[in-house]
Amino acid sequence: MIQTLLDEFSRRFGPGDAPRRFFAPGRVNLIGEHTDYNGGHVFPCALTLGTYCAARVRADRTLRLFSLNFPDAGVVETTIDQATPLPGGSWANYVLGVVRAFTDAGHALPAGLDMAFWGDIPAGSGLSSSAALEVLVGTALKGLFGLRVSGTEIALLSQRAENDFIGLSCGIMDQFASAMGKRDHAIFLDTQTLEYQYAPLALTGAHIVIVNSMCKHALAGSAYNDRRAECERALAALRTVRPGLPSLGALTPEEFDALSGAIPDAVCRKRARHAVYENARTLDAFDALRRGDLAAFGQLMNASHVSLRDDYAVSCGEVDALVDIAWRCPGVLGARITGGGFGGCTVNIVSDAAAAQFTETVRREYAARTGLDAQIYTVSAGDGAREVLE
Ligand code: GLA
């Protein structure tokens, strides 16, 4: 595919120096959902699916962008100094947002660029195609202009782009996983401090399977921002009884249960309960994985789904059907919705022996229940964003 991308680059941008190539992965979150903007823990891993770009520095300040995933948009031409989003929700805004975040953070960008992109993360699936694109641009800017910026900083600047330029108040998880992923490892990240540990994904006798529901509900972005606002209201209410409480993630479930009466709104109370309990589950899941207790890990995943469905209300009928089918399949250790929600994917831990049966059952039963064709991917954890040198 890299060759197709390079061919397209020459076709769109003409002859000149060979472009450099960069890659940034998508991610799947094993557990710790909607905890990252609540100061809790997350446990994602980077995928081997991701987005590539071919990029070359120009002599002027023009910025030309082309994506093989959005060919109808043609070449988007602007400048490296473009400060506001392009109209019509252009895909290129994810690129411009990162350029702007770097500039605002004081990284001088000395010239324009020609950039061509291609990725194999299904868009809108909850596997972070947008974070991969942002982190990819940050990685390319670092490489092409020799900027002194760490992987964590690239993640933070990419999150800034998403928050300020795109308008989604996301947390740090997706960009961090894309920037900092490690082959065959999951990342246990404390989003309050950004301290992290890599946990070997030694799933003896089992593997991770992602199932794409192939549905994405409209207004997911605004519903996401609503959830975040509800958590903030809950935190403000809790601070009336616990002054200085830094985040929902700072509470144990027991502490939360003792204080939760201070949250007057029942909906906000449920959202906060999810955030607190999910964080506790994530800590337990990290321990379970270290002990090699996949059964316990799977149970925590299942409980995560129930909480996301009932307390956080970010699942939907189609995804609940996928999880329900998985829970009934022999050899499934755990199954839950993954990512922001409102459609998208489930993540499943499936024993090797049951894999073929799982695929067959999920395809058949999901089609029967919803009329949709689920896409199924067996996943291995990959490395984070990098220049492609081979
Ligand atoms: C989206 C956001 C992340 C995180 C997840 C939910 O993927 O980008 O920051 O909040 O939803 O866990």
Image (cartoon, helix red, strand yellow):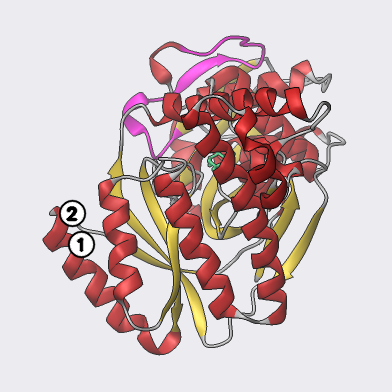
Q: Main secondary structure of the magenta part?
A: loop
Left or right of 297, for residue 210: left
- What kind of element bears circle 1? helix
Q: Which residue is mark 1?
A: 366
**Which quarter shows the N terminus?**
bottom left
Q: Residue 29 in the image: x percent, y percent? A: 56, 55
Structural distance between the alpha carbons of marks 2 and 1? 7 Å
Amino acid found under the numbered disc labelled 1: Tyr
Amino acid found under the numbered disc labelled 2: Leu
Classify 120 as above or below 99.
below
Q: Which residue is mark 2?
A: 372
Name the residue at 46% across, 20% down. Answer: 76
Left or right of 90, for residue 132: right
Dot 2 or dot 1, earlier in sequence: 1
Magenta-colored span: 67-86
Name the residue at 75% across, 64% down. Answer: 198
Q: Is residue 88 visible?
A: yes
Mark 1 neighbour class, 10 Å CA radius: few under 14, some 14 to 19, many 20 or more: many
Q: Residue 132 in the image: x percent, y percent? A: 57, 43
Residue toward you, 280 or 4: 280
Assign ligand 1 to one image quadrant: top right
Classify 92 as above or below 152.
above
Count of all numbered marks drawn on residues in the image: 2
**Which quarter shows the C terminus?**
bottom right
| 69 magenta-colored | yes
Q: Which mark is residue 63?
A: none
Q: Residue 205 in the image: x percent, y percent? A: 52, 88
